[in-house]
């Protein structure tokens, strides 16, 4: 988190976050998230309130004022409210348990105030969505060749590499942006996901399957010809798109490109949808293995892996029909046994 953002908080809260950051060795992004949650709380209860003065009744009033319910249909979603609660609960737990105690409370006022979140369909691509996306990109590539001008997905060859990497590895966007040429081993066919860019802080190896190998090889060759050094960002569209003034590719740049792709495809497409699709298709395959899928996604908790998976309705129907078939055979065997016995 930037220090400028921290200084926008009252000094008592700022001091608390600084100690927490030092003790827990928090990442800047995590610290920024905590700061944002505090800012939202103080916007409701008042900037003059100190941590130990916040009571459970304050939190419940805040929840009723901002969360979505029948009397407040325009409020924030349950997931957003729960996110604030988790962050503030973590801050309070740290302050209460620290020595010396930084928050004079016995129990966190954010304990047990989360809302039940509605279960929504998993964010996966439509059936055969990857084939449609490839067709859309191929049309843009042909347009660039014929008209000798950039298309909406320019440069198509680079973004095709990005798409194939997301599809075949299930990699997170933050990790993709952190890949350097030195992290790619074409001979042994893997990409090293360094710990600092992994969500769980654990190094991971992404296999380069046969279908992905030619795309990564092309990117590596193009980067070498462009003078990209081993410790430079590899997935950097700005190297080949001179219409931009940026030197490194960032999240905002990728998200805007995916918005253009979504409009052309006719449905939402995002890096995270590729990750959910990756998990779902792995488990839906004939040799689907939840433990291996967990490893492929670099999840610490297998519950996170299961939360990523969307079971198609047709698959559920076939599974139920399989039980019916087995039951029919069992009934036939029993009937045959009775006749033979008689």
Image (cartoon, grey):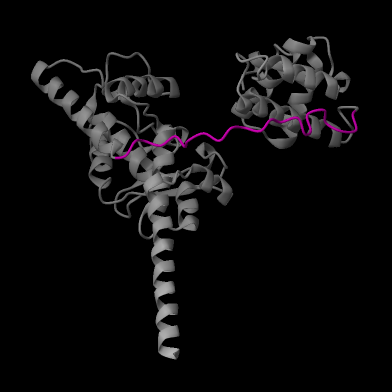
Q: Is residue 111 magenta?
A: yes
**Residue 105 horizontal/vertical position (percent):** 89, 29
- Identity of the residue drawn at 30% across and 23% down: 266
Q: Visible in this render: residue 143?
A: yes
Image quarter where the C terminus lies is: bottom left
The residue sitting at the left extreme is 146
Q: Is residue 194 magenta?
A: no
Instruction: Name the main secondary structure of what is drawn in magenta.
Output: loop
216 versus 109 height, above or below: below
Image quadrant where residue 69 sits: top right
Q: Visible in this render: residue 191?
A: no
- Identity of the residue drawn at 23% across and 39% down: 218
238 versus 232 height, above or below: above
The residue sitting at the bottom extreme is 341
**Residue 192 horizontal/vertical position (percent):** 42, 46
State the residue in front, 195 or 136.
Answer: 136
State the residue in front, 68 or 144.
Answer: 68
**Residue 267 horizontal/vertical position (percent):** 34, 26
Image quadrant where residue 72 sits: top right
Magenta-highlighted residues: 105-127
Image quadrant where residue 21 sits: top right
State the residue in front, 175 or 256.
Answer: 256
State the residue in front, 103 or 202.
Answer: 103
Residue 93 is left or right of residue 271, and the answer is: right
Residue 328 is left or right of residue 148, and the answer is: right
- Identity of the residue drawn at 47% across and 37% down: 122
**Residue 270 horizontal/vertical position (percent):** 39, 29
Image quarter where the N terminus lies is: top right
Residue 184 is left or right of residue 117, and the answer is: left
């Amino acid at each position: 988190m930037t220090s400028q953002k921290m200084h926008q908080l009252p000094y008592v809260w700022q001091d608390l976050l600084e100690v927490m950051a030092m003790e827990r060795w928090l990442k800047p992004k995590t610290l920024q998230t905590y700061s944002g949650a505090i800012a939202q709380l103080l916007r409701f209860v008042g900037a003059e309130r100190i941590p130990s003065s916040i009571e459970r009744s304050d939190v419940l009033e805040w929840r009723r004022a901002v969360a979505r319910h029948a009397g407040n249909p325009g409020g924030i979603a349950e997931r957003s409210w729960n996110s604030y609660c988790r962050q503030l609960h973590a801050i309070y737990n740290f302050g209460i348990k620290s020595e010396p105690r930084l928050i004079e409370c016995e129990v966190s006022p954010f304990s047990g105030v989360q809302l039940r979140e509605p279960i929504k369909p998993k964010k996966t691509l439509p059936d055969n969505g990857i084939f449609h996306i490839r067709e859309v990109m191929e049309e843009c590539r042909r347009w660039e060749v014929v008209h000798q001008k950039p298309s909406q997905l320019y440069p198509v060859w680079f973004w095709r590499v990005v798409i194939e990497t997301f599809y075949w590895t299930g990699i997170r966007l933050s990790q993709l942006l952190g890949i350097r040429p030195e992290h790619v081993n074409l001979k042994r066919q893997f990409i090293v996901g360094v710990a600092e860019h992994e969500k769980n802080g654990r190094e991971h190896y992404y296999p380069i399957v046969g279908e992905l190998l030619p795309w990564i090889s092309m990117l590596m060759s193009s980067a070498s010809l462009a003078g990209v050094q081993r410790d430079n960002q590899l997935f950097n569209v700005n190297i080949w798109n001179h219409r931009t003034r940026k030197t490194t590719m960032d999240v905002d740049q990728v998200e805007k490109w995916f918005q253009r792709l979504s409009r052309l495809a006719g449905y939402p497409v995002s890096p995270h949808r590729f990750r959910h699709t990756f998990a779902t298709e792995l488990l839906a395959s004939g040799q689907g293995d939840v433990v291996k899928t967990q490893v492929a996604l670099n999840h610490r908790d297998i519950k996170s892996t299961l939360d990523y998976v969307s079971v198609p309705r047709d698959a559920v129907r076939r599974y139920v029909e399989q039980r019916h078939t087995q039951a029919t055979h069992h009934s036939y065997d029993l009937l045959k046994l009775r006749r033979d016995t008689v």
